[in-house]
Amino acid sequence: MLVAKDAHRRRPEVSPVTIGFLLSGFLVWSVVFPATAESQEPPPTFPAQVEQVTVDVVVTDKKGEPVTGLKKEDLEIYENGAPQTIVNFDAVELAAAAPAETPAFRPRVSTNTGHDRRQAGRTFVIFFDDIHLSPFTAQRAKAAAADFLRTETREGDRVTLVAAGGGAWWSTRMPSGRDEMIDLVKRLQGRSVPETGRDRISEYEAMRIHVFRDEMVMNRVQRRFETAGLTTMTQQSQHVTGPRAVEDPVVTARAAEVYFGAAARNRITLGALERSLQALMGVQGRKSLILVSDGFIYDPQLDLFKRLVDASRRANTAIYFVNSRGLEGLPLAMTAEFSAPLPGEDIGSAFAESFEATEGSESLAADSGGFTVGNTNDLTSGFKRIADETRVYYLVGYNPTNAARDGTFRKIQVKVRAKGVQIRARKGYYAPSAQQEARSAKPADPEFQHALDSPYEVDDIPLRLTHFVREETSLLGRAHVLVAVEVDIRNLALEEKEGQSTGTLELLLVAVNRETGQFVRQDQKVDLKLPPATRERLARTWLPIVRELELGTGRYQAKVVVRDKATGRIGTVVHPFEVPDLSQFRVTTPVLSDTRDDTEQGGTGNRLAILARRDFPEGSSLFCQVEVYGAARLESSRMPRVSMGYQVRRSDGALYTQDAPSVINPTPAGSLSRMIGFSLADATPGDYEIVMRVKDELSGKSLELHEPFSVTPALSSVPAAPSSR
């Protein structure tokens, strides 16, 4: 019988440092429609005290190949030496990564419906610790990460790229998002500049001196300073080797400076790691966080280390540390950068520095069930080993016999009734603590933040999302962009008051620029008051909500989180889009709609209602509106000359209707806009496409636009709401 290795050694615990992610205040919208369904009950909840522990178990043979075919009775699990009853067991085996495929076509409208909630694909978080990566080691790490994305990801995998310093938080699905993810990896840079001055102190030495007043380390650093020709206050002999040392203000001041800088960097990295793990809670399937870093020290003053181990347990996510330092030669203090030789008694401690510098990152990997890829320049093989480990594993769940909420560390052992195999599993976890939970209470909204950060969509509230790039808004090269989200109201817990259905939606919109990492964020509350007829109509077409943004040229990813305030149900949807170069000949994003906005006088206006949906009932009239910018102008009249025509074709290529190209009449200011329309009375249900051809008659430039839509049968009743799963 083989036993998993012991846990990483424990360090003393101290008071926690609480880091919160606050949500900004909500803008309140009241949506009242001029002149019923039953409220939905909230989903069932379970006491927080009853927490099942789930452990991912990886079993390999002597060659490192995964062992398959194990059954529940082949495994035993122990907590602090006490046997536990396995209540859940699942053997997972995925096929090897398929060859790279052509990225899938991205639909014009994104939705969170139609996805498998079991999420059979794997989930990877590539955590690029630019705070602790140097510019040199970052290049090696980026090349290995790009190779991993090209060769080791497969259909259905979800990958999130996070930069510790805040330069990236980008999630995508493979293979459609592979190329853009690789481009984003290439843009990241290491921001850590190694210290090479004569007064250099390692971060570990600084912690030992400033926090623990370690006299042996203090003595060692002072000897090194004096050997390098630095003036100290006490000027003791460089060959003093006794355990006692006089605290030298020069040494202690330098140690304090280095320690506070290291602690600040560690808080940034560990805080981003905790947020990344929290985003994976509730996500099923194999989850792996790949920490790409030069490493960081273990600081017992930071309670974040303990919280990260707990977060990895709750998210059931293994942390893998890829040490981008590669093969290391002589310690830095023994290289040509330092002219003065080390005292002989300090050579051993110099060789231990590389271990001390990565002890914190290695402990996270060991305690979470992952491993460290280190002492090699072949980081690509390390990434491959991580990917291979996610293909075959066993999910083992048990309810701990020790239900005490004392915050202590519980050691986990996994035994397998087989010979010649190796076992890797989580080394343990921290039990919940009522006192700790009370101290860690935050005024933030963690459910909203976790839903925003998660790489997966949540479909408890069905949503649709799309975008419309409009005119340029200023001389700064920013475009007016409309983001349209539609909400399925059928499962909302609406309350009947005075003949109207009332309720409140909380909505969060974030749009992130892929290249720069800059983002815009909007929060709002939408108060609903729906007369019966309006509620019936919105049950068919969904509730439209449109937000306006000003964005520069680039590729973006918009994410919307919607929550029903009454039940807490959440829906999220992600939509990628691009703002083109506004200086070129271009057409605004076509607006498809079966509804025209009314004028203030009550008549039919010349603008279409902004919709995300692309399905329209047979017998209705469909309109499409575009605007043209960047066309050449006549020298005499300063007016453009642009023509446009279109065809509507069925999915089999059959022509449904068309209009020959004709010149768009400009306004007195030279603006170009055209609205086309046609009846769907003769259209059979199915998929269609509008093909529009726009030509600048003066410059000869032309554009072709394809706008898909669907025709649906006319419904005589409200469709049933999707069941809660």
Image (spheres, rainbow, N blue to C red):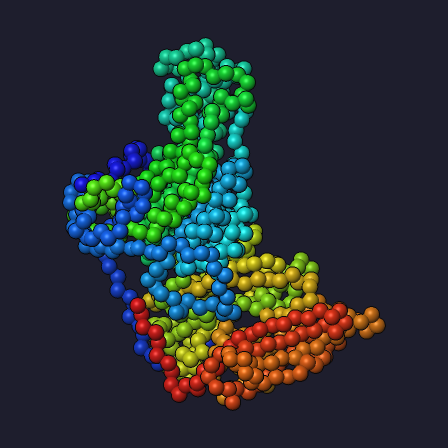
Residue 174, position as x, y percentages in the image: 45, 58
The quarter of the picture where residue 5 lies is: top left
Residue 657 % position (x, y): 58, 85
Say if residue 413 shows up in the picture: no
Residue 89 versus residue 625: which sits nearer the camera? 89
Q: Is residue 226 left or right of residue 360?
A: right
Q: Quadrant of residue 714?
A: bottom left
Quadrant (top left, top right, bottom left, bottom right) of the N terminus: top left
- The answer to whether residue 299 is left or right of residue 198 is left
What x and y, as percent, mark residue 716? 39, 88
Q: From the viewer's side, name the closer residue of 266 and 704.
A: 704
Residue at (38%, 77%) from the top-left corner? Answer: 501
Residue 530 lies, in percent from the top left, at: 42, 78
Left or right, 577 with reference to 385: right
- Of the 4 image quadrants, the one containing the C terminus is bottom left
The structure residue drawn at horizontal position 20% and vertical position 53%, both measured from the top left corner, is: 71
State the residue at coordinates (27%, 48%).
Answer: 67
Residue pictured at 38% horizontal, 66% vertical: 115
